[in-house]
Image: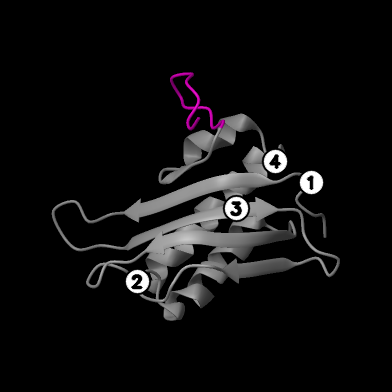
Amino acid sequence: MTGLPVPVPDVRVRVRMNVGSCGPYAHIDADFAPPGPDGGLELLNAVPAARLPPEYLPALRVGLLEGLDGVAAAVLLKDGHYHEVDSSEFGYRIAGQQAGRAARIGAGLLPPEEADTLRWVTWPGRLRPWGHRAGP
């Protein structure tokens, strides 16, 4: 298993598919870092349960594993939010997938053009289809 070679801070995902009706909603802000000595995925949650209920963390973890696709990383959840009606495990799984792929792109493990496939995620330095960078 390879590890994330460099930190990718400030990955923000906001899944919103509720235009005109209810749908999955999820919001996370995370920092990705190279893995610890044990490798694998280390998920640290610094978000209060009132902002991100713990029942969504297993789905988020599954999504992160899918998005990282075998790349080991330490992930610090810095912020998050849920919606009482629209949030679901499905939404947090999507958020994890998008965040994991964003980390691989930000670390140079996937080509920058792959960012065009990520609908709900931003990170500093992300190339947009129109040639502008996201973030500061």
Residue 134 placement (x, y as % from top left): 47, 30
Q: 91 left or right of 11? A: left
Mark seen at residue 5:
1
If you read the primary sequence from the N terminus, does the residue marked by circle 1 or circle 2 appear first? 1
Q: Earlier in the sequence, mark 2 or mark 4?
A: 2
Q: Amino acid at mark 4?
A: Ala
User: Callout 2, which amino acid?
Assistant: Ser
Kind of residue sitting beneath label 1: Pro
Q: Give left or right: position of 111 versus 128.
A: right
The answer to whether mark 3 and mark 1 are in CB contact below 8 A is: no
Magenta region's main secondary structure?
loop
Q: Which percent across, then down, holds residue 74? A: 69, 61
Q: CA distance from mark 2 to mark 4?
A: 29 Å
Q: Which one is earlier in the sequence, the residue at label 3 or at label 2? A: 3
**In the displayed structure, would residue 7 be above or below residue 41?**
above
Foreground: disc 2 or disc 4: 4
For disc 3, the marked residue is: 31
The answer to whether residue 15 is left or right of residue 3 is: left
Quadrant placement of the N terminus: bottom right
Relative to 135, residue 94 above or below: below
Query: Spatial distance from mark 3 to mark 1, Cα to Cα?
Result: 14 Å
* Residue at left offset 70%, top offset 66%: 41
Q: Residues within 10 Å of mark 1 (few under 14, many from 20)?
A: some
Could you tell me which secondary element the residue under label 3 belongs to? strand
